[in-house]
Image: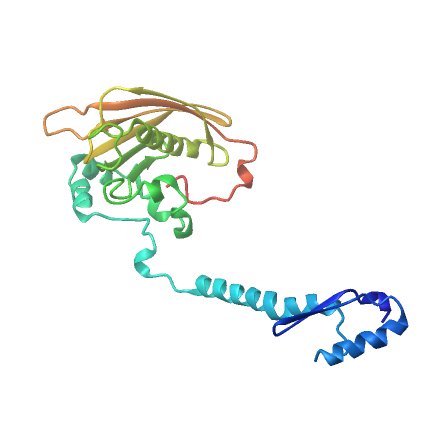
Amino acid sequence: MSPRAYSTVSWRSVGTLTRFRSCRSSSDITCWRRQLATAGAPSVFPVRRIGVGIFRYLILPVLCLSVGYSAGLYMMPVPEDAVPKTVVYDPDIDAAIDALPLVCSLRSDPRYKESRPHVTAPEHLQEEMLTAGVLSGPGKLTVPPIIWNDTEAHELISVVHLGRNLCGHPGIIHGGLLATLLDEGLCRCAFPTLPSKLGVTANLNLNYRSPALTDRLYVMRANVVKVDGRKAWVKGHIETVPEPGKEPIIVVEADVLVIEPKWAKSLPKIVDVTA
């Protein structure tokens, strides 16, 4: 090793500090080693080994400890009650839906096919879907909406229950939620008319007619009014479930233009859109 590899070295003993000058010639090295030996230090003390020691005995153990702790957290089992349940059923709400005259009539009509898209969607995607995930549950969309689809007449009817945690004003359902439900429902009505059975909203117009109160059942109706290649125009509305002998009240009306994008065929199907 070249003498220049050694520089000024400080050696601290108990209560004393001995300084050694830099060795600039081979004759000084002998004296330098003699002084180190007298001080009780090893005869060769290269400065470059200090960095190796710091890495081996300080940085490396801390790094290993951090990796082990992180791996332990990752592999720690998650309690079952911490896993969100995306599909929630309220038996009382389901029973109220089953008892509706409209529902009984739709289930006896062979033209309509009944489905619950929130349930048939893959479980690992339900939490990522707005209405099937974050907007579903007690006080919100309390049960998965039920849909009846007549693909020949291009008509769709859906029944949904809206809870008290979906308000804009107290006791009144947020208008943005109604727009979301109409957007999804009217697009679903249009899908069977498109070449690839898939489309996106190009334009959505809304007219709010009456406040929608919380904790009530509502009916959505939609029908396709025009189809032109990759474009479909749909009209629809959300109405109340009337009391016996009364007419339903229209809450909000909408019309939408649905367009099948050119890249639609490259997208995987999540659910059967004709269901």
Looking at the rendered structure, the number of numbered marks drawn on it comes to 0
Residue 153 visible in the snapshot? no
Figure quadrant of residue 78: bottom left
- Residue 232 x, y percent position in the rendering: 44, 25
Query: Height in image: 88 above or below 97?
Result: below
Colour logic: rainbow
**Residue at the (77%, 65%) spot, across then down:** 8
Residue 202 shows in the view: yes
Quarter of the image where the C terminus is located? top left
Q: Nearer the viewer, residue 88 or 193?
A: 88
Q: Residue 224: percent from the left, percent from the top? A: 38, 26
Q: Is residue 135 left or right of residue 226?
A: left
Figure quadrant of residue 238: top left
Name the residue furthest left: 245
Above or below, 45 against 181 in this view is below
- Give how far across and how far down residue 14 sits, in percent: 61, 74
- Locate residue 145: give its quadrant: top left
Q: Residue at x 12, y 24 (%)?
A: 246
